[in-house]
């Protein structure tokens, strides 16, 4: 009888602990949430991260702040996020760059497949080939190719850093067309766009989301979008295939991860909140204007997509001979 009472007391304590844990997680969030963005302010990631953070704050009733930690092609911030306490108050907003990094860098301070839990894809705008119209006065992709073939290596393109999708998109384009371009790396997409607009570089292979406002302002000229179909936000811009280069499709996707060890129910809740936020009229309209549809890829399915992207870009990096220390 005494032993049974002990067992009953232990069971009661276990149930109480479970109830307290569930109640605590059900109350999430109780304080401000930080989203680590591994690039400087003003780049493509910021274009989507900041309005999304604002919408999440409205839904959750708590502050959601963006912490820009740029450097090393987005890997520095990823390392910071990977080491964050997995309590549901730090998330990481990275993207296609982080599927490229494992094939580019010999040593990383994190493993995107082991040190993070996939939450959801957030945006997937196509890349667009853009030029500075004053520095490189071409009006079509054909004119760009003709100029590059006539002047091998003299046309340069900017990127967010060695191993970024901007970089590998340019290398892939050069491989497919047989031209020679000179790569100029910057510390993030924001500085790269400034370099393009001011004429420091001739061209870029940028995500439509970060280029869209500058295209509309006339600061840079779009030659083609790297997608199967024209973008509804810029229907006059042809696809790369329509412009004469088949089988070249590249998107600059952005996504959310949580540090490994974050409670599963909080990860699931964040996934639900992100889906809700993405489908609000104001966010959906902004995404449309920036050339991105609303993705429907969360959890394990998103994780499988990341795995496939690591394999894809690893092949491009090897063929182009791209590697970073």
Image (spheres, grey):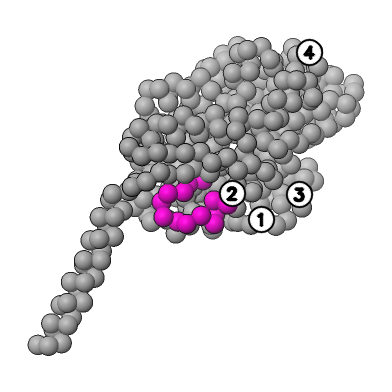
Tag 1 or tag 2, which sits nearer the N-term? 2
Tag 3 or tag 4, which sits nearer the N-term? 4
- Mark 1 surroundings within 10 Å by alpha-carbon count, few (fewer than 14), some (14 through 19), many (20 or more): some
How much space separates mark 2 and mark 1, taking CA atoms? 9 Å
- In the structure shown, which secondary structural element does the residue marked by tag 3 occupy? loop
- In the structure shown, which secondary structural element does the residue marked by tag 1 occupy? loop
Q: Reply yes or no: does residue 87 show up in magenta.
A: yes
Is disc 2 in contact with disc 3, using a CB cutoff of under 8 Å? Answer: no
> Which of these two is toward me, 124 or 46?
46
Mark identifier at residue 184: none
Residue at (38, 35) in percent of width and height = 57
How much space separates mark 4 and mark 1, taking CA atoms? 39 Å
Please report the bounds of the magenta region as a residue range: 80-92
Residue at (75, 30) in percent of width and height = 158
- Name the residue carrying label 3: 324
Q: Quadrant of residue 60?
A: top left
Tag 3 or tag 2, which sits nearer the N-term? 2
Please identify, in this view, whether the residue under mark 2 or under mark 3 is nearer the observer: 2
Q: Quadrant of residue 171?
A: top right
Is disc 2 in contact with disc 1, using a CB cutoff of under 8 Å? Answer: yes
- In the structure shown, which secondary structural element does the residue marked by tag 4 occupy? loop
Mark identifier at residue 134: 4
Mark identifier at residue 78: 2
- Mark 3 surroundings within 10 Å by alpha-carbon count, few (fewer than 14), some (14 through 19), many (20 or more): few
């Amino acid at each position: 009888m005494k032993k049974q009472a002990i067992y009953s007391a232990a069971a009661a304590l276990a149930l109480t602990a479970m109830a307290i844990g569930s109640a605590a997680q059900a109350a999430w969030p109780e304080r401000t949430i930080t989203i680590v963005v591994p690039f400087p302010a003003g780049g493509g990631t910021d274009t989507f991260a900041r309005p999304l953070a604002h919408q999440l704050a409205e839904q959750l009733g708590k502050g959601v702040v963006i912490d820009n930690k740029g450097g090393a092609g987005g890997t520095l911030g990823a390392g910071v996020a990977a080491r964050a306490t997995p309590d549901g108050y730090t998330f990481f907003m990275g993207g296609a760059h982080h599927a490229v990094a494992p094939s580019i860098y010999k040593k990383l301070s994190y493993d995107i497949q082991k040190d993070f839990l996939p939450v959801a894809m957030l945006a997937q705008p196509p890349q667009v080939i853009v030029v500075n119209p004053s520095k490189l006065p071409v009006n079509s992709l054909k004119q760009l190719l003709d100029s590059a073939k006539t002047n091998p290596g003299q046309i340069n393109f900017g990127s967010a850093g060695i191993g970024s999708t901007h970089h590998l998109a340019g290398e892939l384009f050069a491989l497919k067309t047989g031209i020679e371009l000179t790569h100029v790396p910057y510390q993030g997409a924001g500085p790269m766009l400034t370099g393009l607009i001011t004429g420091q570089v001739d061209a870029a292979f940028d995500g439509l989301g970060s280029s869209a406002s500058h295209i509309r302002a006339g600061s840079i000229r779009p030659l083609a979008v790297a997608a199967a179909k024209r973008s509804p936000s810029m229907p006059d811009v042809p696809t790369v295939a329509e412009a004469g280069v088949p089988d070249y499709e590249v998107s600059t996707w952005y996504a959310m991860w949580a540090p490994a060890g974050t409670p599963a129910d909080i990860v699931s809740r964040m996934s639900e909140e992100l889906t809700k936020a993405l489908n609000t009229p104001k966010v959906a309209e902004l995404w449309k204007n920036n050339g991105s549809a609303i993705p429907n890829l969360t959890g394990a399915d998103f994780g499988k997509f990341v795995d496939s992207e690591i394999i894809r870009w690893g092949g491009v990096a090897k063929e182009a001979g791209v590697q970073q220390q």
